[in-house]
Amino acid sequence: MGSLLAKNQIWETCVICEQTKSAGIHLYTSFICTDCESIMIKTDTSDPKYKYYVEKLRKVTKSGIYS
């Protein structure tokens, strides 16, 4: 039964690390994996990586629908 559940998992590409993962959250139309979510939450604003995450999250505000 475990292999049946694994086959039914949905894999999506994380907007932060750009890797395909099965677990994470959706923010608007974007997917953020649990690994990146955990790291971002722990990152201090004075850390140089903070700016990197802010830049990556700018993708989330851009609509994927163009008219």
Image (spheres, rainbow, N blue to C red):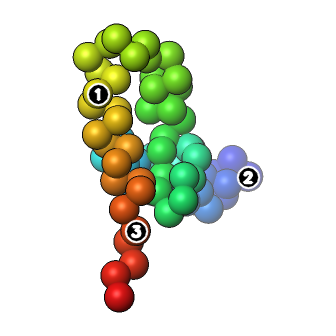
Q: Residues within 10 Å of mark 2 (few under 14, many from 20)?
A: few
Provide the secondary structure element on which disc 1 rests.
helix
Percent position of residue 23, x then y: 56, 44
The residue closer to the viewer here, 28 or 2, is 28
| Left or right: 55, with 40 as reference point | left
Q: Nearer the viewer, residue 54 or 39?
A: 54
Local SS, label 3: loop
Q: Nearer the viewer, mark 2 or mark 1?
A: 1
Please determine whether, in this image, residue 60 is positioned above or below residue 23.
below
Question: Which residue does the image show at 41% across and 56% down from the upper left?
Answer: 61
Q: Does label 2 or label 1 sit earlier along the sequence?
A: 2
- In which quadrant will I find the C terminus? bottom left
Mark 1 Cα within 10 Å, few/some/many (few <14, many 20+)? few
The residue type indicated by label 1 comes to: Lys
Q: Residue at x 34, y 53 (%)?
A: 59
* 66 vs 26: above or below: below
Q: To which residue does mark 2 refer?
A: 1
The residues tagged by marks 2 and 1 sit, at their Cα atoms, a distance apart of 43 Å
Residue at x 61% of width, y 62% of height:
8
Looking at the image, is mark 1 or mark 3 earlier in the sequence?
1
Tag 2 and tag 1, C-beta contact below 8 Å: no
Disc 2 element = loop
Between the C-alphas of marks 2 and 3, the distance is 39 Å
Give left or right: position of 21 versus 51: right
Task: Name the residue tied to disc 3.
Answer: 63
Q: Amino acid at mark 2?
A: Met
Read off the residue under disc 1.
51
Horizontal side, residue 32 vs residue 19: left or right: right
Q: Residues at badges 1 and 3 in contact (C-beta under 8 Å)?
A: no
